[in-house]
Image (cartoon, helix red, strand yellow):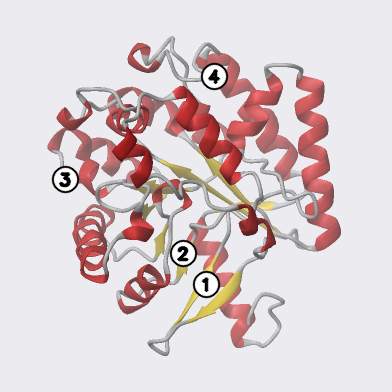
Amino acid sequence: MKKPFASISLDLDNQWSYMKIHGDEGWDKYPSYFDIFVPHVLNILDDLKIKITFFIVGKDASIEFNKPYLQQIIKRGHELGNHSFNHESWLQKYSHDEIVKEINDSHQILSDIAGEPLVGFRGPGFSWSPDLLEVLSEKGYIYDASTLPTWIGPLARKYYFMTSGLSKEERKDRSELFGKFSDGLRSNKPYTWTLNNGKNIFEIPVSVIPVLRVPFHLSYLLYLSGFSMALMKLYLNIAIGFCKMTGTEPSFLLHPLDLVGGDQIKELAFFPGMQISSERKTKVFKEIISALSKHFELVNMSTFAQDLNNRRLKNKSPYAS
């Protein structure tokens, strides 16, 4: 019997992006750790024999230093998605014209590197808006993957503000970061947006545990593993169990600092979780992937989106609306 899908993606936020998020000086010189991280993660994915989607920031793709590493991603059989040009988590506050420029600038340069037009987008900080969806649909995108249907967003935002050196103005810009309590009412399964321009686009949410509506992407599991591997495995098994019980095909999210520690990227050693070694993080990740692969076929985002579209065309998709 064919396994249901689980799509795997990584938001390839760069060193400067983490510095900008934290309110650190020097981010605007765009320091990069791609030379360290990209070979590291590609070797891990090769060991696991899985192909995933890397959501890339357009600004990084415009810098010559980074391009060979993005090309390595393509050569090793993975795909690129659009993660905006400037990686500003208040994208939902942009005007229509600003969104058009943001998408166009990132789309062109990333498509050139990928060798084909991109078909998927994820907003930084889970930011999205109706205008954004219309711009994406006009550009030919098949899916958006920006929503996180959990109720804990405001709590995460409060913690973020407490641990960063942001100014009052910067906090105002980020006032909607990670969403609202009401986001916990959004669908946890993929669905179709029907837009005012007459077009459709799939939404593939970053999965949370069905019913409980708490996240289980790699950052959370890694955090739990710091207390107890048994606790982490229990949490993951609960997530898998609820996904299977509700017929949810998960979209599993990774971030760079989930897979590399302060032992390799000393400039970000101050970030939470960076005291955990890269070796330890890699071990935890491999155990998680092993558990997921027992129950799901692990695929990249566009493979999952195309399968959703095929089901919709056959009128057999539980996700079409």
At label 1, which amino acid type do we have?
A: Phe
In-image side of 185 versus 89 (left or right)? right
In-image side of 132 versus 163 (left or right)? left
User: Of label 1 and label 2, which has the lower sequence position?
Assistant: 2
Q: Work out how far the residue at label 2 is from the one at label 4, CA to CA, in angstroms.
A: 29 Å
Which part of the image, by quadrant, shows the N terminus? bottom right
Residue underneath mark 1: 202
The picture quadrant where one finds residue 291 is top right
The picture quadrant where one finds residue 48 is top right
Q: Work out how far the residue at label 1 is from the one at label 3, CA to CA, in angstroms.
A: 28 Å
Q: Work out how far the residue at label 4 is from the one at label 1, CA to CA, in angstroms.
A: 33 Å
> Are circles 1 and 3 on residues that touch, CB within 8 Å?
no
At label 4, which amino acid type do we have?
A: Gly
> Are circles 1 and 2 on residues that touch, CB within 8 Å?
yes
Residue underneath mark 4: 273
Residue in the image at 27% along x and 70% along y = 96
User: Of label 4 and label 1, which has the lower sequence position?
Assistant: 1
User: Of label 2 and label 4, which has the lower sequence position?
Assistant: 2
Image position, residue 31 (x, y; %): 22, 26
Residue underneath mark 3: 62
Residue underneath mark 2: 144
